[in-house]
Every structure is written in structure tokens, then in C-alpha cells.
Image (tube, rainbow, N blue to C red):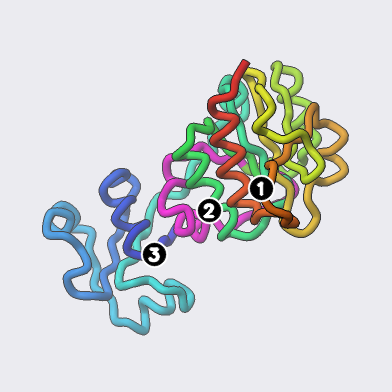
């Protein structure tokens, strides 16, 4: 698994050194001296054209890492947690990365991506500023299976929707799930049939909606504290 960009690579080097197999350097002085000495036996210097090739034209900022593939936690373990975020058909890696970052910073226990068969985890690691390396993240394509199993172990499912109850007026079950629909379609019909409560963000000014990642940050923050 190749990740690139100064911020996410430095995060991985500092927080998860055991996962790093190779450090690719394409810009002199990009590594702090401490990290340069710590990883000197794993460093390989690259010409710019090879760095561009490895990053597929992305902004690598002179630093790339090869790291161990991310390990997906067992669903059976995730079901023991209290606060989960479920992505219902989201595919945009920028939005997913931002949601991962907010979920990790604001105290969600895990994220489950549904409605898709695969995701670009390298890009999500980058757009999450490295938070994906610490956030339990599962990919389970069938949202009905996820919802049914979470209901069976006592979770209440809350779906984000414009016509939901304003989240400022709600309290939430101890075992709770926030379900976020995709940008274009919102919550899928499969998810809507399983949700216990729809929640929304009350606007101060007339506006159609917030970006899904911005809405996620607000909803996750509120659901992290307003527990019965």
C-alpha cells in the first residue's frame, strides 16, 4: 500500500513506524533529522519522474511510503462498541477521508462503509490526514446485513436527512449508529426501511443542505454527548 504527501507520511512514520516497509524520498530535507536516522535503512531516494509515477500524478510533496495493508477489524468486535458511523453508498474519497478524520477526532468507535464493493484506501488515508490508520474501518457491501445485525445487538439507527428531527432537540441511545447517505442520492431505500429515527441539522438561514462531510462532523459531535 503506497501513501504519499508530507502530512500523512509523517503521521505514519511517527505514529505507526511498525507498518512502514519503505520510505521513498524525492525532495532533499523533507524528513526531520530524527526520522531520517530512525528509518535510514528503509529510505530509498527517487527521481521526480518516478515519484510522480508512484503517486499517479498526485501531489506527493517529495515523500511517499510503502506501508502494510490496513487490517479490517472483525464485525463481531465492532458490534461490542457504542457509537458507529455507517456510510450508505459514499464513494468520494475526499468526503470519506474528512468523515474519518472527524469521526476519529470526535469519538466515534468505528466506521462501516456499505453500498460499495471497493474503495481507494490509499487516497482515504491521505484525505483523512492519516486518521484512517487509527480508525477501525470496515467494508461490508450489503447495508441490510449491517443494519439487521446491529439491531440484533441493541443498536438504534439514526439516519441523516433534511426532513429529520433537529439533532439539537434529541437525545440518543447508548448504542447508536449514524447512517450517512451519498451526496447525490441521500439515504438508500434499503437503509430507510431499517432506520429508527431520522435526524437533521437545524439551519439558521435558508439553505438547501451541507456537504456530507461537514454535516457528519456536526452530527458526530452532537451524538457523542447527547446520550440518554
Whichever of labels 3 and 1 marks the residue nearer the N terminus, that label is 3
Residue to which mark 2 is pinned: 97
Residue found at the far bottom of this picture: 49
Nearer the observer, disc 2 or disc 1? 1
- Please give the name of the residue rendered at 79% of the width and 37% of the height, measured from the top-left corner: 164
* Residue 34 location (% of width, % of height): 13, 54
The reply to whether discs 3 and 1 touch (Cβ–Cβ < 8 Å) is no
Tally the marks: 3
The reply to whether discs 2 and 3 touch (Cβ–Cβ < 8 Å) is no
| Cα gap from disc 3 to disc 1, whole angstroms | 39 Å
Depth check: give the residue in front, 83 or 166: 166
* Residue 210 location (% of width, % of height): 66, 54
* Residue 213 location (% of width, % of height): 60, 51
Residue to which mark 3 is pinned: 4
Q: Which residues are magenta?
A: 114-138
Identify whether 52 is placed above or below 118: below
User: Pointer 1: residues within 10 angstroms few (<14), some, or many (20+)?
Assistant: few
Does 123 sit left or right of 59 as displayed? right
Disc 3 on helix, strand or loop?
strand
Check if residue 101 falls in the magenta segment. Answer: no
Residue to which mark 1 is pinned: 204
Amino acid at each position: 500500500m503506497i501513501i504519499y504527501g508530507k502530512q500523512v507520511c509523517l503521521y505514519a512514520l511517527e505514529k505507526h513506524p511498525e507498518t512502514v516497509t519503505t520510505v521513498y524520498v524525492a525532495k532533499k530535507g523533507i524528513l526531520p533529522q530524527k526520522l531520517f536516522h530512525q528509518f535510514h535503512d528503509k529510505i530509498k531516494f527517487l527521481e521526480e519522474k518516478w515519484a510522480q509515477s508512484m503517486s499517479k500524478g498526485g501531489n506527493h510533496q517529495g515523500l511517499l511510503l510503502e506501508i502494510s495493508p490496513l487490517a479490517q477489524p472483525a464485525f463481531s468486535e465492532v458490534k461490542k462498541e457504542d457509537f458507529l458511523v455507517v456510510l450508505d453508498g459514499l464513494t468520494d474519497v475526499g468526503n470519506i477521508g474528512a468523515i474519518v478524520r472527524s469521526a476519529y477526532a470526535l469519538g466515534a468507535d468505528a466506521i462501516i462503509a456499505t453500498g460499495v464493493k471497493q474503495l481507494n484506501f490509499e487516497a482515504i488515508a491521505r484525505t483523512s490526514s492519516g486518521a484512517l490508520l487509527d480508525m477501525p474501518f470496515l467494508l461490508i457491501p450489503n447495508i441490510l446485513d449491517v443494519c439487521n445485525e446491529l439491531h440484533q445487538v441493541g443498536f438504534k439507527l439514526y439516519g441523516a436527512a433534511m426532513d429529520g428531527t433537529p439533532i439539537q432537540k434529541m437525545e440518543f441511545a447508548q448504542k447508536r449508529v449514524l447512517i450517512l447517505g451519498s451526496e447525490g442520492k441521500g439515504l438508500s431505500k434499503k437503509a430507510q426501511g431499517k432506520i429508527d429515527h431520522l435526524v437533521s441539522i437545524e439551519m439558521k438561514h435558508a439553505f438547501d443542505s451541507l456537504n456530507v462531510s461537514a454535516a457528519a462532523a456536526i452530527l458526530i459531535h452532537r451524538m457523542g454527548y447527547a446520550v440518554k
